[in-house]
């Protein structure tokens, strides 16, 4: 009988485990890495994750790479070569591994290994050129909990084993342990108990046979409050780390000090450091500086409003043997030093200069800078040479430096919105020029063209085959697209921020809201499997389609299916059924299916329940429009309507002095004062265009939903998503007229090819992905619902950055070699 009971127990557990499937939320390939997210499985104590591809079958990943974020799990797989992969997730219940689920095929791309760091056949860091770990590589994991206790026996180090990250690196400082070292950071890591003046310092005694990589895992690895310093080192790679709030003595987020070579820093996010003592350190000191080092590559980094991005050179006092490459970096509203160069031969190509308040590239102290195929948008001074041209224009005594000048050779750069840029011209600007603009990439700059101060000529390093490396630059436009897609951490990192170009392009002040977000940043990481061995108790609720829908009265909505899981055992629906909308609850599949044709606007909510775990809920509104049309447009003028409106709620004072303007065939005289007490609120049910008409010639600002907009000839026009809207004073003026015009729906051709393409997630916040495609993507075009083209991508794209687009509905058209498919996408912030 005991044997029968034991057998039945084992059978019951086996049936329970093998029946469990994993609901996969998201899967994608990235640069020599991949990741997958999934819903928690009830009763699972842990998960096993395997990947197949690149000549490997069902390789199990390390436990530390599997993390819980409360409502979902995520696993990242670094160190894999370019190619196609699938990922398998298996829940472990009562010690038994279930069948789990396997993802669709994803594509992993290679890192761009171009630049001086790879000269002379070097491959910096502990990974091979194909992205896989080098032979005998040692991997250690650093988390907030293990940063001071992680241990490793380092050859030649005392004591042994070395305990704590900096102690381990101290052991490698001697250069005797030749095992490649990979340090993987997970989550938000604050100051360690043992550091060197507030920095983690990487050294290996310049041993050419020693290789070290420090990398972040996933999109949320953060060095919070400390910097990384590299000195007396060779073959070092730093990647995929967010740096913020640095308060080290040196002050640099990441800094290369003396005697380094073959260093590669890439795909990092550089945020504000703590303010320093100098006036120009309000955003911290240097973001990524380099001194007395050579054969360096800084690529695909994202600088978020940095004050001083890249100082290059200090007291080298030679122009011989100093080589560095900057490529595919995103200077996102950063102010200056992109880079600021002394002495070096610097290749600066394919970077995106995006709203830079002070200047782009500066050349001093006999440096030679080749500036090629970059994209400059509203960069005040794209290129400056010390003490000549724009640097001393209109009586200035050195805009950025009073040192001797260098020389900039420029080729095929795209510029718009710059304040001033003067190319060399033998007749008009033989001395007062910013850069020599070459007609071909390989053009040699004449030795007769010299810096005004110091008299040094360009050294033409870029045309010397004994020095220059092989590379293939993108066009400036393609470079901009690639930079916006791949710069910074995986999928752009977890801290999302959208700058207001109207303000931030020209401002070099601290963005207070961004600063507050950085100071208040807290990771969403809940648990690391290899660290805790347990899961976090959660209740989950996910949906297909948009929770909020707007249709014509009596027209069927798109079916909405909610699925509950994790530790949720039931759900409660509030507000349904009513007004033609019903729902069906299926406890076997754990779903709520909402459908029907509304006869009135219907708000509803769904809440989970369970014995354990934190409950979650979802809400939505189904809006029924009358007369089979979009909502009616709304106008208001204070001449005929005063402050009375059934659509706009208006608080404020009418100016006792009449004005007079003519707009849209109306003669308007009454006007509302735009002052501190003035507020106008209203609600829209779909995407609309707001038009405000102010005093004639008004060129100040008004705030709509907290964003400042500048009037042109007294008029402001703003595109807004559906929802609640608020208009308040920006600058003092008077308002005559308000118009809200709803946008019509763009017709979709019924004959468009139905292809096997999946666009997800939908709704999307930041990145839209194209999956399950066995066709070659030629182009992706994105339209607003009024038919305006808002974005175009290049051939072969699979991940599209949507973060710069306003919330609302869009039509995405994917053109393939076999036809086209269109899909409506919703952007939510």
Image (cartoon, rainbow, N blue to C red):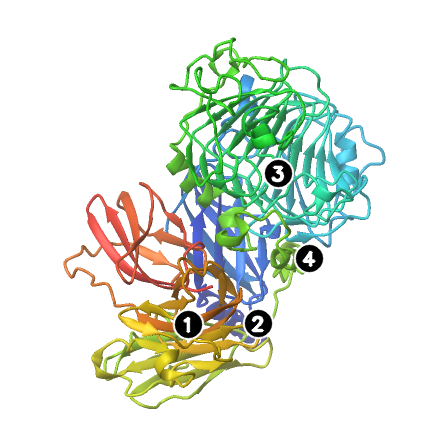
For label 3, the SS is loop
N-term mark: 2 or 1:
2
Name the residue beneath numbered marker 4.
Answer: 519
Residue 384, quarter of the rendered image? top right
Q: Residues within 10 Å of mark 2 (few under 14, many from 20)?
A: many
Front label number (4 vs 3): 3
**Numbered disc in front, either 1 or 4:** 1
The quadrant of the image that shows the N terminus is bottom right
Judging by the rendered image, the residue that carries numbered circle 1 is 659
Disc 2 vs disc 4: which is toward the camera? 4
Per the model, the C-alpha gap separating discs 2 and 4 is 28 Å
Q: Is residue 276 left or right of residue 296?
A: right
Of the numbered discs 2 and 3, the one sitting upstream in the chain is 3
Label 3: few (<14), some (14–19) or many (≥20) C-alpha neighbours in 10 Å: many
Q: Closer to the N terminus: mark 2 or mark 4?
A: 4
Residue 399 position in % (x across, y down): 62, 33
Image location (x, y in percent) of residue 263? 62, 28
What whole-number distance in Å separates the C-alpha atoms at marks 3 and 1? 49 Å
Q: Position of residue 139 (x, y in %)?
A: 64, 40
Residue picked out by circle 2: 538
Instruction: State the SS at label 2.
Output: loop
Classify 727 as above or below 441: below
**Disc 4 residue crowd, few under 14, some 14–19, many 20+, Cα 10 Å:** some
Residue 235 percent coordinates (x, y) = 63, 26
What is the distance, in whole Å, between disc 4 and disc 3 at their CAs? 20 Å
Residue picked out by circle 3: 309
Q: Are marks 1 and 4 in contact (CB under 8 Å)?
A: no
- Work out whether residue 763 or residue 747 is closer to the camera in this orientation and state it: 747
Question: Could you tell me if the residues under marks 2 and 3 are in contact, i.e. CB atoms within 8 Å?
Answer: no
**Foreground residue among 246 and 671:** 671
Using the image as rendered, state which of residue 514 and residue 448 is in the foreground: 448
Instruction: Find numbered disc 4 in the image and state the secondary structure of the residue it sits on.
Output: helix
């Amino acid at each position: 009988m005991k044997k029968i009971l034991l057998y039945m127990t084992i059978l019951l557990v086996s049936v329970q485990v093998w029946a469990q499937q994993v609901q996969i939320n998201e899967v994608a390939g990235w640069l020599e890495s991949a990741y997958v997210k999934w819903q928690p499985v009830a009763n699972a104590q842990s998960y096993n994750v395997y990947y197949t591809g690149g000549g490997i079958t069902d390789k199990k990943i390390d436990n530390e790479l599997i993390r819980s974020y409360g409502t979902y799990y995520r696993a990242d797989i670094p160190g894999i070569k370019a190619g196609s992969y699938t990922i398998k997730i298996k829940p472990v219940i009562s010690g038994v591994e279930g069948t789990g689920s396997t993802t669709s095929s994803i594509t992993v791309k290679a890192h761009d290994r171009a630049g001086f760091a790879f000269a002379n056949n070097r491959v910096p860091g502990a990974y091979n050129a194909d992205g896989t770990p080098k032979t005998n590589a040692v991997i250690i994991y650093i988390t907030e909990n293990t940063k001071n206790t992680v241990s490793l026996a380092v050859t030649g180090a005392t004591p042994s084993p070395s305990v704590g990250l900096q102690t381990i690196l101290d052991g490698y400082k001697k250069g005797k342990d030749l095992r490649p070292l990979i340090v993987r950071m997970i989550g938000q890591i604050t100051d360690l108990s043992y550091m060197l003046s507030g920095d983690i310092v990487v050294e290996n005694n310049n041993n050419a046979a020693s290789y070290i990589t420090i990398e972040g895992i996933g999109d949320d690895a953060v060095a919070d409050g400390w910097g990384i310093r590299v000195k007396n080192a060779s073959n070092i790679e730093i990647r995929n780390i967010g740096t913020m709030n640095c308060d080290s003595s040196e002050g640099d987020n990441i800094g290369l000090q003396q005697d380094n070579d073959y260093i590669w820093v890439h795909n990092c996010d550089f945020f504000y450091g703590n303010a320093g003592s100098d006036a120009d350190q309000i955003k911290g000191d240097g973001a990524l500086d380099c001194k007395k080092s050579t054969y360096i590559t800084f690529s695909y980094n994202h600088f978020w409003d940095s004050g001083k991005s890249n100082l290059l050179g200090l007291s080298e006092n030679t122009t011989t043997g100093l080589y560095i490459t900057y490529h595919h970096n995103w200077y996102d509203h950063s102010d200056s030093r992109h880079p600021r160069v002394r002495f070096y031969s610097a290749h600066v190509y394919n970077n995106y200069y995006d709203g830079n308040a002070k200047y782009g590239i500066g050349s001093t102290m006999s440096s030679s800078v080749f500036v090629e195929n970059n994209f400059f948008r509203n960069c005040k001074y794209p290129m400056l040479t010390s003490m000549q041209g724009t640097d001393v224009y209109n009586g200035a005594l050195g805009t950025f430096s009073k040192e001797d000048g260098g020389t900039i050779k420029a080729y095929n750069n795209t510029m718009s919105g710059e304040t001033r840029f003067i190319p060399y011209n033998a007749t008009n600007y033989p001395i007062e020029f910013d850069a020599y603009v070459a007609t071909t990439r390989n053009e040699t700059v004449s030795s007769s063209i010299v810096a005004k101060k110091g008299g040094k000529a360009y050294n033409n390093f870029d045309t010397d085959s004994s020095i220059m490396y092989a590379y293939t630059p993108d066009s400036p436009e393609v470079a901009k697209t690639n930079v916006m897609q791949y710069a910074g951490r995986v999928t752009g990192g977890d801290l999302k921020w959208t700058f207001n170009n109207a303000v931030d392009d020209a401002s070099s002040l601290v963005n207070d809201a961004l600063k507050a977000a950085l100071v208040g940043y807290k990771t969403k990481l809940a648990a690391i499997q290899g660290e805790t061995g347990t899961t976090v108790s959660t209740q989950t609720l996910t949906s297909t389609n948009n929770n909020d829908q707007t249709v014509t009265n009596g027209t069927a909505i798109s079916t909405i299916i909610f699925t509950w899981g994790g530790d949720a055992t039931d759900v409660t629906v509030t507000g349904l059924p009513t007004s033609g909308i019903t729902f069906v609850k299926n406890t076997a599949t754990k779903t709520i299916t909402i459908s029907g044709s509304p006869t009135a606007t219907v708000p509803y909510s769904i809440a989970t329940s369970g014995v354990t775990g934190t409950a979650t809920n979802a809400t939505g509104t189904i809006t029924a429009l009358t007369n089979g049309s979009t909502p009616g447009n709304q106008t208001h003028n204070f001449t005929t309507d005063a402050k009375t409106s059934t659509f706009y709620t208006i608080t404020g004072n009418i100016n006792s002095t009449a004005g007079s303007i003519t707009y849209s065939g109306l003669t308007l005289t009454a006007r509302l004062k735009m002052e501190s007490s003035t507020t106008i609120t209203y609600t829209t049910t779909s995407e609309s265009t707001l038009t405000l008409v102010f005093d004639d010639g008004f060129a100040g600002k008004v705030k709509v939903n907290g964003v400042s907009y500048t009037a042109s000839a007294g008029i402001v026009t703003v595109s807004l998503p559906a929802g609640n809207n608020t208009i308040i004073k920006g600058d003092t003026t008077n308002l005559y007229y308000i118009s809200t015009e709803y946008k019509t729906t763009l017709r979709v051709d019924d004959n468009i090819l139905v292809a096997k393409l999946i666009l997800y997630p939908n709704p999307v916040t930041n990145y839209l992905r194209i999956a399950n495609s066995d066709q070659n993507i030629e182009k992706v075009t994105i339209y607003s619902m009024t038919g305006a083209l808002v974005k175009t991508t290049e051939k072969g794209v699979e991940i599209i950055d949507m973060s710069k687009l306003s919330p609302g509905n869009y039509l995405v058209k994917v053109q393939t070699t076999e036809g086209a498919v269109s899909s409506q996408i919703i952007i939510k912030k």
